[in-house]
Image (cartoon, rainbow, N blue to C red):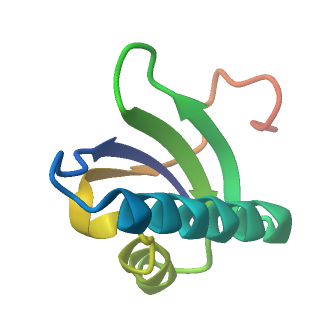
Amino acid sequence: MLYAVKMDVAIPHDLDPAERDATLAREKAYSQDLQRGGEWRHIWRCAGQYSNISVFDVESNERLHEILWNLPLFAYMTVEVTPLATHPSDIHTYRG
């Protein structure tokens, strides 16, 4: 199942710098592991914002929920999830 997920990040300005750096390092490692495993298919930065739009390819809603809730930055995020379906005009995926 494919999902587009927009993640807006708002790290508190008064967060301890060492905690911030450690959280960002864990976030990067976690996301890259999921990318290598194929569940986090794409990640794009939204220009001019502390946000990204990502595409996940996971087996279920529950798996996506688990991934998102385990993001080290999740406590500082607003997340918007959009389930995706194949579009009949897409020459790469539609075989109708």
Residue 29 lies, in percent from the top left, at 68, 67
Q: Quadrant of the C terminus?
A: top right
Left or right position of 68 against 79: right
Please say if 58 is above or below 13.
below
Q: Quadrant of the N terminus?
A: bottom right
Please say if 49 is above or below 63.
above
**Residue at image location 75% in from the left, 60% down from the top:** 35
**Residue at image location 81% in from the left, 71% down from the top:** 37
Please say if 85 is above or below 64.
above
**Can residue 39 be seen by looking at this rendering?**
no
Residue 66 lies, in percent from the top left, at 44, 84
Left or right position of 27 against 89: left
Left or right position of 21 against 79: right
Residue 42 lies, in percent from the top left, at 67, 43
**Residue at image location 39% in from the left, 78% down from the top:** 65
Please identify the quarter of the rendering in which residue 31 is found. Answer: bottom right
**Residue at image location 78% in from the left, 37% down from the top:** 93
Left or right position of 28 against 13: right
**Can residue 15 be seen by looking at this rendering?**
yes
Which of 29/16 is in front? 16
Please identify the quarter of the rendering in which residue 49 is found. Answer: top left
Residue 22 lies, in percent from the top left, at 50, 68
Badge count: 0
Which of 13/33 is in front? 13
